[in-house]
DNA sequence: CTGAAAGCGCTTACAG
DNA sequence: CTGAAAGCGCTTACAG
């Protein structure tokens, strides 16, 4: 049905070898021949068969990207960056969304691996114990989680979190709340610890709540608990939860930024648009995606043999949801 | 490197044919033989090579999904549903995001088509004139746009829009604003017209604004224009724009639902969480995705020859952002 | 029920 | 610079 290399060769009165070279390795062919081949292939509407090519060269040029939830605004920038970079390098990306079901992660990763040359796994939700099984699907690069002996791109929440706590301390807050993300989240543990150690250093008290799912609804729920306690400021695991907190506070007539301060994490588009605008920690998702692809391609072509974890920094973006502690 | 069918065959003392059948068409093989093959294949860690299979059977079992912007909350439910359905049918989906650049759409669709058996194109942004070129990439099913002679799943905003206008009329509003989405959006045209005709019927005046990009920022901008006019209620092209309007109104001290009424479209997660909660039009994105996959598979296996457009309905979800017109 | 053989559509050493 | 041939790893009529 579709026109093949052989059809073009026959029409051009040349061998398949020559047609193949003319199309994919032009230097190896006489200029006139090349032109002729290109013209005829064009006229015939020849489209190379990727599958056959893959079988011959031993790779698919497909890379897999596993994400916990594409509806979570943290991931689209990563996804877009991965796609853009992959595309620039002649690769196509296949995305699998595990819908925040950690139990499906390994199986989905295995399936994905079968069809692709390698994997980028963003924010893996699997327990530490089972992480090795994901690693075995090599080549794989992890984003947003440190995995022993594996390539990883780590977004270090530490700096941003420390800045956030310092910011609140400077505003006079003495007791701050932290709304935990999911237990399975490695970032959450990292954030908790950064908050804890900075708070200790500055003599602040941290009250913990959660764990919560990274959803607006969680924040709505958490807001009421928070108001029953003594914190005058709160840092949420992510912007979605922070936005939920603000929505509920507003609903209860409490002024965010005046009566209570709120900080999120992700610097998602909504954070600059909410009312009041949300103080948050900028996380370089796009950069992480780009770097992850480069790292994977390096693994694939053997340029990289012993991958070092790559660390990206975060920083606080101060907006209107934080203000001086009420007296 | 990887173990092949032939390796398993050699280890089992059988032919490749038998191993192949034992693994993919068990009924055609003696029970004892099958068990042996399955056991040995398991022990050897045999993973069938998809590429070789695809080349042989003439299909990739990959389907392409083209979306304007995965960061737009309208699309994740569609994407998830497409993936879920495709996966249930043994297909894998490759997503391409055109980042709201209509100019890239055709090219990306072509690339995607080369690697897949067929396409689902969500909310195509291409002009009517060039739509035929997308159709030619058959088999393709369009979601959220009616395309002559092509398979399509249409989300009919008409009902929901009519309900929205009736709702506002019942609340006493006489002048309503409509914030247009992008000119390239087919849905926008459909929504404009539905609003216009219902408003005519009920004797309301419609003031139009825009076009606006489907982003929160657009709503922030639009809010000020709106306040300078006479509308007491506004319907936005989508929830993002509506949320932006509300954020800006709140910022200016205007009470949404009391001083002015706001209606969005999409019923995205944020709409139920915003303050006040947003009256919006529910759009069956997930259902559209599922139906689109079924339709594409039907086209692929020849079950469907002359596709009829499939129409899905929308409905108004009343929340707190709409209220009686101020006197 | 099982096997030998052909074929899917490419790429690429190897000769000439 | 060009061509004949082998091979990538499967599936599937066709025989037996």
Image (tube, coloured by chain):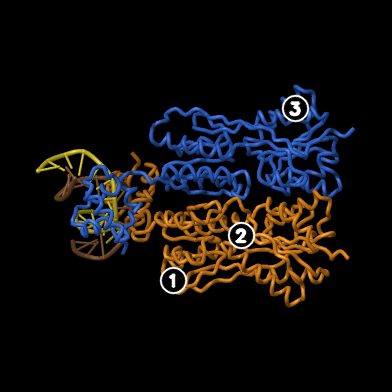
Chain colours: A orange, B blue, C brown, D yellow
Neighbourhood count class around disc 1 (C-alpha, 10 Å): few under 14, some 14–19, many 20 upward: few
Residue A288 locus on image (x, y percent): 57, 64
Identify which residue is drawn at 57% across, 52% down: A70
Left or right, D9 with reference to B148: left
Q: Secondary structure beneath disc 1?
A: loop
Does label 3 lie on the same chain as label 1?
Answer: no
Q: Secondary structure beneath disc 3?
A: helix
Residue A303, which numbered label?
Answer: 1
Which quarter shows the N terminus of chain A? top left
Nearest to viewer (mark 2 / mark 1): 2
Residue A246, picture quadrant: bottom right
**Earlier along the polypeptide chain: callout 2 or callout 1?**
2
Which quarter shows the C terminus of chain A? bottom right
Q: Residue furthest front?
A: A228
Image mark 3: chain:
B
Residue at which label 3 appears? B166
| Residue A32 shows in this picture | no
Does label 1 lie on the same chain as label 2?
Answer: yes
Identify which residue is drawn at 82% across, 69% down: A171
Nearest to viewer (mark 2 / mark 3): 2
Image mark 2: chain:
A
Does label 3 lie on the same chain as label 2?
Answer: no
Image mark 1: chain:
A
């Amino acid at each position: 049905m579709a026109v093949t290399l052989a059809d073009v060769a026959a029409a051009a009165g040349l061998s398949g070898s020559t047609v193949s070279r003319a199309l994919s390795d032009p230097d190896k062919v006489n200029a006139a021949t090349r032109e002729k081949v290109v013209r005829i292939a064009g006229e015939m509407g020849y489209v190379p068969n990727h599958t056959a090519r893959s079988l011959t060269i031993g790779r698919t040029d497909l890379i897999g990207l596993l994400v916990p939830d594409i509806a979570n605004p943290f991931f689209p920038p990563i996804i877009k960056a991965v796609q853009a970079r992959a595309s620039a390098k002649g690769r196509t990306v296949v995305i699998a969304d595990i819908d925040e079901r950690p139990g499906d992660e390994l199986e989905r990763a295995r399936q994905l691996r079968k069809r692709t040359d390698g994997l980028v796994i963003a924010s893996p939700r699997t327990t530490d114990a089972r992480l090795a099984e994901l690693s075995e699907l090599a080549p794989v690069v992890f984003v947003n989680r440190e995995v022993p002996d594996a390539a990883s791109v780590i977004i270090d929440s530490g700096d941003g979190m420390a800045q956030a706590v310092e910011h609140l301390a400077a505003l006079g807050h003495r007791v701050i709340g932290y709304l935990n993300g999911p237990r399975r989240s490695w970032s959450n543990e990292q954030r908790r610890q950064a908050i804890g150690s900075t708070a200790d250093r500055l003599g602040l008290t941290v009250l913990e709540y959660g764990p919560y799912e990274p959803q607006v609804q969680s924040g709505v729920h958490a807001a009421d608990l928070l108001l029953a306690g003594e914190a005058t400021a709160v840092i949420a695991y992510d912007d979605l939860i922070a936005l939920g907190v603000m929505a509920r506070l507003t609903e209860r007539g409490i002024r965010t930024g005046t009566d209570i301060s709120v900080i999120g994490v992700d610097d998602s588009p909504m954070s600059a648009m909410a009312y009041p605008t949300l103080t948050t920690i900028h996380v370089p998702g796009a950069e992480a995606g780009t770097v992850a692809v480069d790292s994977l391609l390096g693994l694939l072509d053997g340029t990289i043999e012993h991958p070092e974890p790559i660390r990206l920094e975060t920083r606080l973006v101060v907006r209107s949801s934080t203000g001086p502690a009420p007296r």
